[in-house]
Image (cartoon, grey):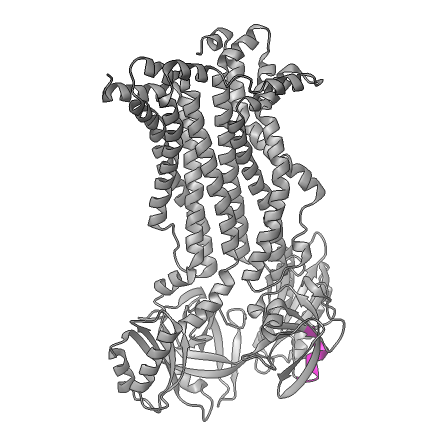
Amino acid sequence: MPGAGPVARAVGGGLARRKVQTLVIGLVLLVSTGACVLALGLVVDSSAPFDKAFAAQHGADVVATVDRAVATPGQLAATARLPEVTAAAGPYPEAMISPQIGGRTVTLQPMTVAGRGGPGGPLDDLVIQQGRWAQRPGELVLSSDSGPGVPLGTQITVSGVPGTPRLTAVGYASSINRSADGWVVPSQVAALRAPGAPATAQMLYRFASAGSAAALRTDAGRLSAALPSGAVTGTQSYLAVKAQETSGIAPIAPFVVAFGIIGLVMSALIVINIVSGAVVAGYRRIGILKSIGFTPAQLVGSYAGLITVPAVAGCIGGVLLGNALSVPLLGSTATVYGVGALGVPVWVDVLVPCAMCCLAGIAALLPSLRAGRLSAVQAIAIGRAPAAGRGYAAHRLLGRLSLPRPVTIGLAAPFARPARAAGTLAAVGLGAIAVTFAVGLSSSLNMVADGLSHAKTEPVQVTLVGSGRGGQQLSPSAQQAAVEAALRAQPGTLHYVAQADQAVSVAGLSGQVRMTAFRGNADWTGYDMISGHWYSGPGQVDVPTNFLTVTGKAVGDTVTFSVGGAQVTARIVGEVFDTDNQGLAMLTDWRTLAAANRRLTPYVSDVALRAGTSPEAYVRALGSTLGPYADVSINGKDPFFLTLIGLTGTLTLLLAAVAGLGVLNTVLLHTRERAHDLGIFKAIGMTPRQTIAMVVCSVAGTGLVAGLLAVPAGMAAHRYVLPVMAHAAGTGIPASYLAVYRVWEIAVLALAGLVIAAAGGIPPAAWAARARTAAALHAE
């Protein structure tokens, strides 16, 4: 009775004899594991990026605004020793300012400015995104989340305070708590506080229990009770900031989950097909092993070893591949979200390879147990040929077609192994679905990126900076006149329109809404319509989806807003695709606002270029003309969408590679099974080219059918997932973003399954064509 030694030799001999099969199993598990590690890692990291950033930047559970005239420094310091407080920072003096660019040129919405000596601290570490930190009085660091979007070096005048101090924007920083709109050195704050305004400061706290809104209310109540009455004038919970942040990153979840599901299902299907096919293809060898005394348990052990060795190697390599691919993708995602470093969690690196190895083991165990129950004669007979009668009808039917005989033999081959052909059909189909889905999604995401950034329609923007040549101060009208004259003089200018942003209060809404007023024709600026139409005159506004959702309005309703103490009523004439200010925005004609705010001044000009004009060259030429009057910049796409598009391509390539390897293995098994038949075909005159045609056609028909079925399925997935992504972002989606498949693209995509199948079938076909007749006849 054979022992462990013969079983080990059987495993080693099987691996040595089936080098290609062993390599394919290892590669498929490598790519499958890598795809699963990447997909699952992205799903996990996409589900809670705020939590990662909160931990990395030592976020505060509550930002409390305190009146320093009511609470003494000692009393504030004592709150850090409360039983429920685990960490505290502050007090950081703060002031509410009314900023203007260039004296009285452009009035911005009020800003909360806090005094901090540096970006670090025990809580709410600030991350410098651009420029540097304020080092002396007169310098301002703006928040990258809520800053006014002015270029660095801009002079910002603070109105309503003695001396009308000026601040120079020297940097941009992000706060996970959004604790302020800007930061200055602490000694600067007193000079920015309006006469009669309370001397407030920020205190930051972390609590032992802060997992719910109720717990935070309790903590804030205890904090207020520990200080004199009226000392705490307001609190901001991290949960409110988290809710706002999550609404911005939620769109990635449906996209990643869709690819993850496709990858997991296809990987499982291919692994099962490959491993079970390898066992079935080895039935004859199983019969020989049984004839020399191997027991069923030893047969299962030997074939488990044949699968386990390449499976384990492939899974280990897959973990390394998935983590390597995640570095640039998660790095870009982390940059977009501002969440510090992101990586594949350790439990994913452990769970996925273990699951894939178990899957491979189960796939090998089931057919091995069946083979172990067969007698030696039965196993040899099954291994020599498919079941009697399988595929003969297909051969006879296809033989009547006016096609070369090698082609009809290849087309009929899948009917001899219908279960294996069905697995190949499903695997190739899933790969083709992924390709179809990815093509549509990439096109839609490009349209979304263009629609939100307007980089395609208005590639250049000009922002006033408030000073003239030689540092002299120019009036707003003079600055705008200089900009418009320079724009008209540039030969590459196609269109331009000036705009101003105004914070307005909308009846029924808390907080302020950003209203953008265009001075001139702006229907070319690239705001895509979801419903309704672009405004055609004063008294009309276009609004994003979330504005309609929050206000309960619909296209055709009227909306009342106040600006400068005056109330204005306008009619909503269109729903635009826009997520600016969380979708709380309005777009209108200049005259709608000018009547209520006669000091309204444009400070941004949007520019469209003539065909063939280089944006870079245009920016250089216009910048040299305007000099210090304005900042001229190229309007680029949001990196968030570039990350998604890159991720789409990466996952699609992985899934297509997995499908191709699955086809390669299927054709390889079929070719080895029919090696004797190939020898006969070669003996009666089949040429190498005819052999290649026959082998490739054995999967070409399956691939073509898979591709034809995959196109409508991939298009349906695209039509379902994209609106879900848009809904997660709080917006509707224009119909044009869904109708992205052109006729010629559909025709090409229908061939995706054929291409995947042919790519996987060519290597085994070449091997079969090179095989000598005598070697093929003796292959069994």
Q: Position of residue 370 (x, y in %)?
A: 39, 25
| Quadrant in which the N terminus appears | top left
| Quadrant in which the C terminus appears | top left
Q: Nearer the viewer, residue 232 or 174?
A: 232
Q: With 101 as the anchor, is 317 left or right in this view? A: left
So how many labels did they put on this image?
Answer: 0
Q: Position of residue 30 (x, y in %)?
A: 41, 36
Q: Nearer the viewer, residue 130 or 265?
A: 265
Task: Give the residues in magenta.
Answer: 588-598
Q: In percent of the image, x 28 and y 75: which residue is there?
A: 85
Q: Position of residue 289 (x, y in %)?
A: 33, 16
Q: Position of residue 618 (x, y in %)?
A: 65, 58
On screen, residue 742 above or below 513:
above
The reply to whether residue 116 is visible in this rendering is no
On screen, residue 163 above or below 671:
below
Return the residue found at the far right: 536
Residue 79, by quadrant, is: bottom left
Q: Is residue 22 magenta?
A: no
The reply to whether residue 114 is visible in this rendering is yes
Q: With 288 as the anchor, is 677 left or right in this view? A: right
Q: Nearer the viewer, residue 465 or 560?
A: 560
Q: With 469 as the anchor, is 258 left or right in this view? A: left
Q: Is residue 590 magenta?
A: yes
Q: Nearer the viewer, residue 628 or 392?
A: 392
Q: With 679 as the anchor, is 314 left or right in this view? A: left
On screen, residue 271 above or below 261:
above
